[in-house]
Image (spheres, helix red, strand yellow):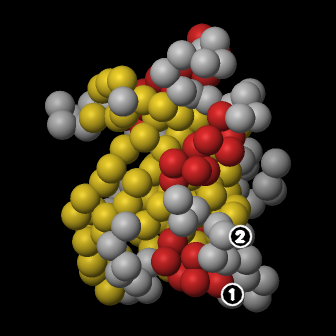
């Protein structure tokens, strides 16, 4: 457990091929994966507003969520930067819940922690890295009923999964809440 951020709730891997990445984990008994295709996501990358397109897929292994992300648009982002330095992909971030990203960032600043936000999605997600010891980023995730609900769906899917049936499932957010569909 991090003394600064609490318990890690997710390992985030950035990959050049999300389908191959999911199959890598499924072959090791981790699944099922719940995938979403996100288009036109409002983001701020190194202080500049942009819209991003990516695919993200989620599964659980025990209490640890595994996320795989593939950037799709070639725009500057932490994901594109990571693949530029690691073309085969790999562990890019560790995620932690927080009640308020703004409050957590303010507390880090008050405590003299040297972290810089490289990318954010509104007040829901912020990716930061140590300015003194860069490497695997920290993702702060705002704890919301919607996000907790999604995590429960994915964890429940893993607990009930037989290891073979529907190893990849689609997340549809069009209703405002996550709806799971077969792929």
Q: Secondary structure at mark 2?
A: loop
Count of marks, rendered view = 2
- The tag on residue 115 is none
Name the quarter where the C terminus is drawn.
top left
Image point (51%, 72%), residue name: 79
Query: x, y (%) of residue 175?
Result: 17, 31
Image point (45%, 50%), residue name: 56
Image point (42%, 29%), residue name: 169
- 25 relative position to 102: left or right: right
In this picture, is 131 found above or below 102? below
Residue holding disc 1: 131
- The tag on residue 136 is 2
In this picture, is 136 found above or below 61? below
| Residue 151 is at least partly visible in this image | no
- The quadrant where residue 28 appears: top right
- The quadrant where residue 14 appears: bottom right
- 164 relative position to 18: left or right: right
């Amino acid at each position: 457990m991090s003394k600064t951020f609490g318990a890690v709730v997710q390992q985030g891997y950035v990959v050049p091929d999300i389908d191959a990445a999911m199959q890598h984990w499924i072959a090791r008994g981790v699944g099922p994966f719940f995938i979403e295709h996100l288009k036109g996501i409002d983001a701020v990358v190194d202080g500049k507003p942009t819209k991003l397109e990516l695919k993200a897929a989620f599964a659980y292994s025990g209490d640890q969520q595994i996320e795989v992300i593939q950037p799709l648009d070639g725009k500057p982002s932490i994901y594109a930067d990571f693949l530029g330095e690691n073309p085969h992909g790999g562990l890019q971030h560790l995620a932690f819940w927080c009640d308020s990203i703004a409050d957590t960032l303010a507390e880090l600043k008050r405590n003299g922690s040297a972290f810089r936000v490289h990318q954010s999605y509104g007040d829901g997600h912020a990716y930061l890295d140590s300015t003194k010891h860069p490497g695997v980023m920290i993702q702060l995730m705002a704890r919301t009923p919607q996000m907790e609900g999604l995590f429960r769906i994915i964890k429940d899917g893993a607990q009930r999964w037989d290891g073979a049936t529907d190893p990849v499932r689609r997340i549809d957010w069009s209703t405002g809440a996550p709806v799971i569909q077969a792929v």
